[in-house]
Amino acid sequence: MKVNIKRNGKKDQLTYYVFATRNEMGEYAARDVGNKLVKLQQNQEEIRMVFAAAPSQNEFLQYLIGDDRINWNQIIAFHMDEYVGLDKEAPQLFQNFLKERLFTKVPFKEVHLLDSSNENEVERYSQLLQKQPIDIVCLGIGENGHIAFNDPPVADFEDKEVIKKVELDDICRQQQVNDGCFSQIGEVPLFALTLTIPTLLSAKYMYCMVPGSTKRQAVTQTLNGPISTECPASVLRTHENAYLYVDQDSFGDE
């Protein structure tokens, strides 16, 4: 299938692409990530990747696992955040989301899961992440502009931590209901573990997939607002190898 880019451009250092549909968005983003992986796997024994867990990533992940050029047994996988307090079998746990759609679908070299029930998890996972540089982060943007679970009240562009425990704001928790992950806001956990913004930005390449009309304000602020923790995703404009993929619904009619 030929994917047509409706619009593309650059805002500061962030390159963005607009597609008619979220399916086209996911296919094109997966192709770009696949192309980068093919190049990296020719020169590196290991590739370290961080993945987001959200419905916004579904099409991207579906196309990515179908790319037969990728040598998955060179890839070490992490995920960027996790709820605190859910049962280990809960489908809403991000590790379970990614197991179902990615981690059990292709033969990774290693998969490192965030265990939010472990009281020493911040230290353990931080050490794993810091062993070697992160090559690729695949992420989304929340309705409040968050990246990972760095909501505006807790986002810190100069954070000294690798991972931290955060309290989720109400907009973030309501988004989980809007996405169909929970039936009501009272079911959404109050706390989560998240990679901090400097940890995400340390990646050599960042690929950000953001479909849907509920994300329109966040996308507008990311591209056109000030670079500020009021819209944490705006910091993507400071990264020299960051790419944003949106559909017409999230981009709007401008």
Image (cartoon, rainbow, N blue to C red):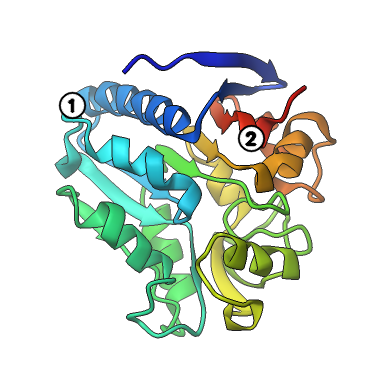
Q: Is residue 61 above or below residue 111?
A: above
How crowded pointer 1 is (Cα within 10 Å; few <14, some 14-19, many 20+) is rated as few
Earlier in the chain: of badge 1 and badge 2, it is: 1
Whether residue 46 sits left or right of residue 191 in the image: it is left
The disc at residue 249 is 2
Assign the C terminus to one quadrant of the image.
top right
Residue 26: x %, y % from top left: 42, 33
Of residues 79 and 179, the one drawn nearer to the viewer in this rendering: 179
Residue 154: image quadrant is bottom right
Which residue type does callout 1 highlight? Answer: Arg
The disc at residue 43 is none
Which residue type does callout 2 highlight? Answer: Asp
User: Under tag 1, what secondary structure?
Assistant: loop
Of residues 144 and 181, the one drawn nearer to the viewer in this rendering: 181
Residue drawn where x is 60% and y is 56% of the image: 196
Residue beneath disc 1: 69
Mark 1 vs mark 2, CA separation in Å: 31 Å
